[in-house]
Amino acid sequence: MNYYIGLMSGTSLDAIDAVLVSFPDEQPVLHHAINYPLSESLRNDIRALCTPGDNEIDRMGQLDIVLGNTFAAAVKQLLTDTDIDAAEIHAIGSHGQTIRHRPGLEKGHCFTLQIGDPNTIAELTGITTVADFRRRDMAVGGQGAPLVPAFHATFFGRDAHARIILNIGGMANVTLLPADTKTPASGFDTGPGNILMDSWIQQQQQQPFDHDGQWAASGTVNLQLLDSLLKDSFFRLAPPKSTGREHFNSGWLQQHLDKFEHTLTPVDVQATLSELTATSIANAIKKYAAENMELVVCGGGAHNADLMQRIVQKRVSTTVKTSGDYGLAAEWVEAVAFAWLARERLAQRPGNLPGVTGAHRPVVLGGIYPG
Ligand SMILES: Nc1ncnc2c1ncn2[C@@H]1O[C@H](COP(=O)(O)OP(=O)(O)OP(=O)(O)O)[C@@H](O)[C@H]1O
Ligand SMILES: [Mg+2]
């Protein structure tokens, strides 16, 4: 069996997703998947590096190695669970942990930075590791993100059915797959996914996330706050566009809350944040997608019942499914996509979609670190 491993640690910092996958007939088969925990101190170190601060080079250099060790440990756990030998794994695709994503700098040079040393992963596991996927796309004028649309197009676009793939992670992004498979797919980040809801419930109730969106569902949307949040210029930008923690974070939220001088209850803020994610997604779809494309949701946000209900209520599509309906559980799609991107890299096939990232041309993505 020609196995690949995908490693994804997204903006939510919920856990490392590690998947063991193979691609018979060009379609992914998921053999095993785990959430490998990130310790609280590791999470804090990552969060601290996501915004400018003191002594960043030393802190980044060390965290790069610590994360490389942690990613390798996740791989070993996956192999132990499945009793599969490292020699049977063709390659690991490791996204790395984004600590800065600056695709739209008006002055200066755009850049994106993912850490989690692939040399360490390759050395500790003995498995060839592919990493640093985003920067080659930037080198040809792209935003380096989102990169999952090429995988979405391969997996969800093969039967000539118009679909929107909506990934709700820390940020949210859409891939628009036209029915005519000769027309290239498009896609972009729509704005925050779970990140603001996660940070608000963490701050107010010391919970990592709002389970099934129950807290948000018990509140009332504050329309003035919603309006203020929706005025952010990112929502008005035309694609290609991508965003991250450096833009949508608890400080951004607080700036808006400050205008209300404590007149809001925490539960209503949570309801409004859920509505913000749903509204910004729906507005983007209504503006850029053809009518009545089937909507397929993936990412952790697919498990947030309140958020899903709000999206359904916006009537962006008469058919709303999750990736699970197509045999790939919502929480593993991104990690599988990076296993697939590693396979594309080794086969010297391009992994970016210029219509999505804004790159001048398709390019082969990622560096190879032999096992
Ligand atoms: N049962 C659930 N109820 C509510 N929210 C959930 C549930 N399960 C997962 N989530 C949300 O999904 C988030 C994790 O999603 P995911 O792993 O897709 O995001 P990520 O790691 O940020 O990835 P990326 O940003 O790269 O897409 C959690 O932080 C949480 O907000
Ligand atoms: Mg995650």
Image (spheres, rainbow, N blue to C red):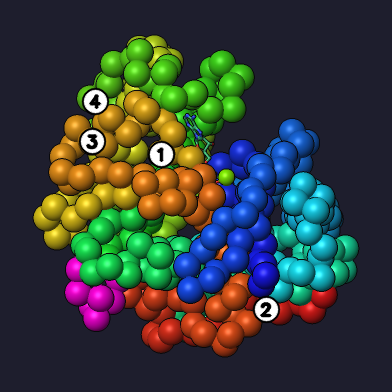
Label 1 within 8 A of ligand 1 by Cβ: yes
- Residue type at mark 3? Val
Residue 110 sits inside the magenta stretch:
no
- What is the secondary structure assignment of the residue under circle 1? helix
- Earlier in the chain: of badge 2 and badge 4, it is 4
**Residue 367 marker:** 2
- Residue type at mark 4? Gln
The x and y percentages for residue 288 are 19, 59
Magenta span dominant secondary structure = loop
Looking at the image, which residue is at 44% across and 25% down? 212
- The reply to whether residue 329 is visible in this rendering is yes
- Earlier in the chain: of badge 2 and badge 1, it is 1
**Residue 224 marker:** 4
Q: Is residue 105 left or right of residue 186?
A: right
- What is the secondary structure assignment of the residue under circle 4? helix
- Earlier in the chain: of badge 4 and badge 3, it is 4
Depth order, front residue of 256/46: 46
For disc 1, the marked residue is 302
Depth order, front residue of 321/10: 321
Q: Is residue 286 above or below residue 339?
A: above
For disc 3, the marked residue is 312
Q: Which of label 2 and label 1 is nearer to you? A: 1
Magenta segment, which residues? 179-185
Depth order, front residue of 242/167: 167
Depth order, front residue of 105/369: 369
Cβ atoms at labels 4 and 1 below 8 Å apart: no
Looking at the image, which residue is at 59% across and 27% down? 208
Cα–Cα gap, marks 2 and 1? 32 Å
